Amino acid sequence: MAASKKKSKKQDRKPGRASSSQKSKTGSSSAASPVQEVLSDEERNPAGTALREVGLTPLAMTWFGILFLSLAALIVYMAWPYITAVVFGLIVAGAFYPLMAFFADRLGWNRGISAALVMLIILFVVLLPVAYMIVQLIREVKVAVDSISANLTQDEIKEFLFGDASWFADLGRELFHYFDEEYSLQNIQAMVVEKLTGLSSIAVNSLQAIVSNVFSFLFQFVIMLIVIYTIFLKGPRLKEFLLELSPLPREDEELLIDRFNQMNYVTLICNGLGGLIQGVLAGIGFYFAGVTSILLWTVMMTLLAFIPLVGISFVYVPVCIYKFIIGDYWTGAILFIWCTVVALVVENWFKPIFMGNRVQINSMLVFLSIIGGMTVFNAAGIFYGPLIV
């Protein structure tokens, strides 16, 4: 009897053990499902999981974002007086960084020596000639205005404008009659000289403001050089630091930087070389056409060549019309053909080959971005507009 009772107890215990083991198995299986759900949440929302790991609640992250944006806005506000120097430093550094990478990476030179060498190239090849041309332009503007205003009294111009057999005189009389104005030499001369004087005074005042405020100009210039040298010397580390601050995925950040560098290259290098070629070749045509103030017109055409579709036509078309007015028809026609061919070849052959497939952007969009940029940022808008777009 006692043995049978022990066997029955053992048999009673076995189902209990089995049931407990089954419970543990079911418990472990039931405990595995929340883990799987957490893992699936991590896969679906890695950012939220990272926040939970750090221990920041959404409210804390919101306050952190507000604080971060406020500090960023304060930094921009403090740097705003020098924003032009900083932006131009970024543009110039981005344009010349391939040369820096060639010296430092390809040739294996010391990074500091490579940065100093590229800085010297920028200083002596680009900036000093620009400073010299600014000083010369102040003189050229006055010479050009005096020359044009003096030539308006020549007999050839009087015959072209007021002669009985001149089609231009008939058109002028009709236009002036429409606006209830007297069609006379005095009115035309006063109008032209007034417009030219207004334009020249704006240019002269702007240039003189730069020259007179030497300290501010030099300070901005030094800031630009510091920005350029810093990017050359610590470009990779600075890039990684900024990318760590950005909330975008790394692929999007790299794409954004690549697009900025490509647009910077197109704006400064491609358009700069294209504008220089157009300005110099058109200036040579002006020289052989007997036009005075060659440096002034060459610089103006070089800058205006940044604007697509119209470009240097803002300068050479009025000059050709002026040649027709004074009766120099052949010179005006040849100059018009020469400048038009130069502009078409550079815009439709040189620039597409030089740009390659770096940036595909419509010319009308570039034109509107440059005009809008110049409206908001003045002359710097030539560079700001395309970069923003």
Image: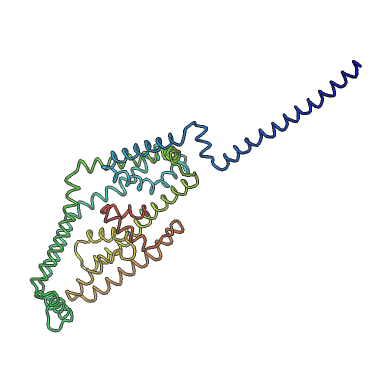
The x and y percentages for residue 76 are 31, 41
| Image quarter of residue 313 | bottom left
The x and y percentages for residue 159 are 12, 78
In this view, 38 is above or below 211: above
Q: Quadrant of the C terminus?
A: bottom left
Nearest the viewer among 389 and 3 is 3
- Left or right of 288: which side holds 234? right
- Left or right of 306: which side holds 147? left
Count of numbered labels shown in the rendering: 0
| Image quarter of residue 24 | top right
Q: Quadrant of the N terminus?
A: top right
- Left or right of 197: which side holds 131? right
Nearest the viewer among 107 and 275 is 275
What residue do we see at 29% from left, 46% from top?
84
The x and y percentages for residue 43 are 58, 41
What residue do we see at 27% from left, 73% from top?
334
- Left or right of 26: which side holds 270? left
Q: Residue furthest left?
A: 186
What residue do we see at 36% from left, 63% from top?
364
The x and y percentages for residue 189 are 11, 69
Q: Residue furthest front?
A: 1
Nearest the viewer among 158 and 105 is 158
| Image quarter of residue 164 | bottom left
- Colour pattern of the rendering: rainbow
Q: Residue furthest top?
A: 2
